[in-house]
Image (cartoon, rainbow, N blue to C red):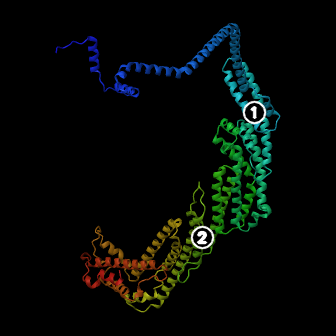
Amino acid sequence: MGTVGLAPGLSRKLKKVLECRTDSPEVVASLNTLSTFYTENTPQARRNLRSTIEKRSLQINLDFLRASQAAQLALDRVEDEVNSLADCCDRIAKALNSCSASTADIISTTERLKQELDVTTQKQEIASCFLRDYQLSPEEINALRDEELNENFFKALSHVQEIHANCKILLRTHHQRAGLELMDMMAMYQEGAYERLCRWVQAECRKLGDTDNPEVSELLRTAVRCLKERPVLFKYCAEEVANMRHNALFRRFISALTRGGPGGMPRPIEVHAHDPLRYVGDMLGWLHQALASERELVLALLDPDSVVDTGSTANRFSKNVENDSGKIEADLTFVLDRIFEGVCRPFKVRVEQVLQSQPSLIISYKLSNTLEFYSYTISDLLGRETALCNTLWALKDAAQKTFFEILKGRGEKLLRYPPLVAVDLSPPPAVREGVSVLLEIIETYNSMMVPASGKKPAFDPVISALLDPIIQMCEQAAEAQKSKGAGHTSRSRRMSSDSGQLSKSAVDAILSNNNSSKFSQNSETPSKIFLINCLCAIQQPLLGHEVAAEYAKKLGMMIDNHVRVLVEKEVDAILSRCGLSIKMHHFHNSLNEDATDGAPLAELEDTTPASLSECLKAFFGFILGSESSLPEFEQMQVPKLRSEAGIQVAKSLADAYELIYNAIMDPRNSYPDPKSLARHPPDQIRTILGI
């Protein structure tokens, strides 16, 4: 069957249907909607599909119109209101245009008046500032002249000072005449205010003398701070304070001395007049306490800026016053010196009475130390060149002079009546008493108070003044003992020579005299031992005290010197008793390598073998004899010194024998049989002597 060609329109539709995608969301949604009202798939239904859809669409539109009918009516009403509002705005605009045209003159007038008001306000502010900075208000003038002195007075005075300072600025402009007139006016107000202030301060200062412990009001401090700008007026007030407090302090001091405190407590100071140390100490303590309180009072008056101020006016004036510490200190010293000038005489008279009452040595020393401590302490607070400090230093010197006069009198009495030397050569009681007093003085010195600005006084003059006379007394007693011993020795020798006419050999004579001259062999020995005992009794208690270290060292040197002299005298006495003393210089010369004398010792008369043999026999007899042959210094009270002195004697004798032995053994001295002459070598002698 042949192919039949399709109509072009049908072909396009068919092609469009075939190309349409049935799975697109739009197609699916349309089909879903169609299924809601296309229920039967019949030929009739398919033919009426288009009309059915159109009816469906028409019904939807009708439903929409019925639903939007109310909104349409509302929009119509809104439109009517908007039209009415537009009409009102047009009428208002026409009314405003009409008013603007009619009030243009009023607006321009208002602007002009506003500008004039601003200018007037500015002028008013300038005038107010000028009046504030260059004029006093009636209230301020009244406060300066008529009202009772109070805080308003100082505010007004501060304003006057500010105006006066502002006038100086005005003088640098072209308003010089106004500045001068204002300055003259303010100067008049200022001088009148200062004179009134000075009279008020003087009256207030007079009231300060009526009470013992006055309180300085804040108003008075502010007034004094203001017066510091007028040095002359300030000086008048300072003198008034000094005079009032001078009289008040004098009354208080006399009352403290005679009547005591309120109700008798504390008791009057003069109750303890029998106790010099407490009496003077109480007066000094009272003066020191009074000085502290008076200084605080005067400082609060003369230098109010040193006290913490809380008032605004006080702070304002403190900024105007330059704090010159040097000037303030000078004013403070001047006022305090005047205040304490009145108590100097009664205090000085009482201390001098104490010093004239002949206090004990310890009391006078403690008084001197107490016065020196308070002299330094009060000088730090009051100043050195003041009446009270000069009085204190003069009394300190007087107490020190009294102390040294007592020491001097004590020493002169000891030297006038030196004690006799005891049989056992022990120190006299005066030595122990002097050392005991010195130890008490040292204890006082170590416990004394030292001021912050001073130092402890030198103690060496005290030791010297106390111990030097004691040492001189011991030396005088030793010298008297020496003279007595020398006379006794000469008498013994005369008796021995008268009764010793029997013929004896030299050795027998020497040995026989050993025991008889044991205590009279050297007249200086007892005196030296006595001196050593005295010096040791003085030195030993001083060794543990630092202040006496130098003097103890000096005593040690003196003791060593006396021991050395004692040993030398004893050795010389032993050698003299053996007949060797006069021969020792020959032995020294023989061993001198520079000696030019060629004569051997054996040929000299003093050192012949026979003479030397006799002397050495006596020496050996002395050394090898009884234990009491060598001096043991039993009366020397310090065991250590006694032992050392005995050892030094033994060493000196051993050294002397060694010198003799070496000279005998020297072939140049031509001794025929030196070993038989010097039988004992030096080492053997040293062993025998125990050294």
Q: Nearer the viewer, residue 56 or 663?
A: 56
Left or right of 433: which side holds 613? left
Left or right of 221: which side holds 564? left
Q: Quadrant of residue 118?
A: top right
Residue 303 appears anywhere in the view:
no
Q: Quadrant of residue 73?
A: top right
Among all residues in the image, which is located at the extreme bottom? Answer: 502
User: Which residue carries the number 2 mark?
Assistant: 440
Q: Position of residue 455 (x, y in %)?
A: 57, 57
User: Which residue carries the number 1 mark?
Assistant: 156
Q: Could you say whether the residue bearing mark 1 is in a helix, strand or loop?
A: helix
Q: Closer to the observer: label 1 or label 2?
A: 1
For residue 403, the mark is none
Name the residue: 60% across, 61% down: 449
Name the residue: 70% across, 46% down: 300
Q: Position of residue 35 (x, y in %)?
A: 38, 28
Q: Quadrant of the N terminus?
A: top left
